[in-house]
Image: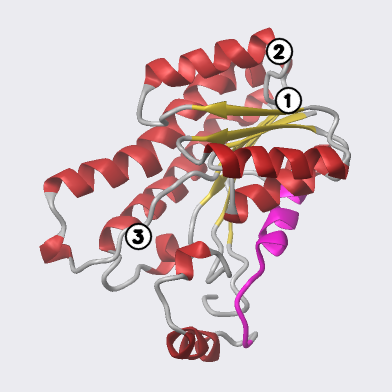
């Protein structure tokens, strides 16, 4: 089985790549600019026992670059059976301060990138009548977040995309699900100081942040052949923060 992880160079994406590598699967690590981080994740995946590891660079906002990426994977015999649409960017500000350019850019990465990547790679899944599309969303796509209206909107759109496409692809035995984590201990929270992070943890019934490996385990489970009856679901591992 081959898995493509977008934004797989670090954080949750790198944890997902490592999880599949540890099961001796072939892993394709997509990145945009984080070349060395992607290579380091690739080296780790090889040490963990991945069947094959490949890094590929593409701007998810560009259909042309994604088509070239698909051609490169096809030539290498690494057509994905599993797509993990993990790449995304956050944006923190009051809605009144969001510029049109920022709105378009975040929408292009978080939503258009997912759409293009899925559209380009799903025909092979349909043809073989097996595939897994797993979208990494966010708790904010379910509940919304003050000062993160733009980010929350993209993740809410991702959830709607997941539910609709799941119905479209179910007859082809391709499942589509979303994982919507709560607060995860990654660089995305580096803008918080120790006091702010402690206050955040106190709001979570589990009393702590999630670890990237915990999210990766859920993604891996959804990719298994025996998870074939789970589709169209938005599953939120959040320590009881949102129910």
Q: Is residue 87 above or below residue 30?
A: below
Tell me the CA gap for discs 3 and 1: 31 Å
| Tag of residue 163 | none
Q: Position of residue 102 (x, y in %)?
A: 21, 48
Q: Is residue 152 left or right of residue 70?
A: left
| Tag of residue 76 | 2
Q: Tell me the residue at 69%/48% (across/down).
A: 16
Q: Is residue 158 left or right of residue 12?
A: left
Judging depth in this view, the residue of 44 and 185 nearest the camera is 44
Q: Tell me the residue at 31%/38% (across/down).
A: 108
Question: Closer to the observer: label 3 or label 1?
Answer: 3
Asked if disc 1 and disc 2 are in contact, CB closer than 8 Å, the reply is: no
Circle 3 packing at 10 Å, graded few (<14), some (14-19), many (20+), is many
Image: magenta residue range: 207-222
Q: Quadrant of the N terminus?
A: top right
Question: Closer to the observer: label 1 or label 2?
Answer: 2
Between disc 1 and disc 2, whose residue precedes?
A: 2
Label 3 sits on a secondary structure element that is helix
Judging depth in this view, the residue of 185 and 158 nearest the camera is 185
Question: Closer to the observer: label 2 or label 3?
Answer: 2
Q: Is residue 178 left or right of residue 127?
A: left
Between disc 3 and disc 1, whose residue precedes?
A: 1
Report which residue position mark 3 lands on: 152
Circle 1 packing at 10 Å, graded few (<14), some (14-19), many (20+), is some
Hey, which quadrant is residue 92 in on the image? bottom left
Q: Position of residue 144 (x, y in %)?
A: 35, 67
Q: Is residue 229 above or below residue 208?
A: above
Report which residue position mark 1 lands on: 130
The rendered magenta stretch, by its main secondary structure, is classed as helix
Q: Is residue 2 above or below residue 146?
A: above
């Amino acid at each position: 089985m081959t898995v493509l992880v977008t934004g797989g160079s670090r954080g949750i994406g790198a944890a997902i790549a490592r999880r599949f590598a540890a099961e001796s699967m072939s892993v394709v690590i997509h990145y945009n600019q984080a070349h060395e981080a992607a290579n380091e994740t690739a080296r780790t995946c090889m040490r963990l026992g991945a069947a094959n590891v490949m890094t590929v660079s593409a701007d998810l906002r560009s259909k042309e670059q994604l088509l070239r990426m698909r051609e490169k994977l096809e030539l290498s015999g690494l057509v994905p059976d599993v797509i993990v649409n993990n790449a995304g960017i956050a944006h923190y500000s009051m809605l009144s301060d969001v510029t049109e350019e920022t709105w378009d850019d975040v929408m292009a990465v978080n939503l258009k990138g997912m759409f293009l990547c899925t559209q380009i790679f799903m025909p092979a899944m349909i043809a073989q009548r097996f595939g897994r599309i797993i979208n990494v969303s966010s708790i904010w796509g379910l509940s919304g977040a003050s000062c993160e209206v733009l980010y929350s909107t993209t993740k809410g759109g991702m959830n709607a995309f997941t539910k609709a496409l799941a119905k479209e692809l179910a007859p082809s035995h391709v499942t589509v699900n979303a994982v919507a984590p709560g607060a995860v201990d990654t660089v995305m929270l580096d803008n918080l100081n120790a006091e702010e992070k402690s206050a955040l943890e106190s709001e979570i019934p589990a009393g702590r942040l999630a670890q990237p490996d915990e999210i990766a385990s859920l993604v891996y489970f959804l990719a298994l052949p025996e998870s074939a009856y789970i589709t169209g679901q938005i599953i939120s591992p959040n320590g009881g923060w949102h129910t």
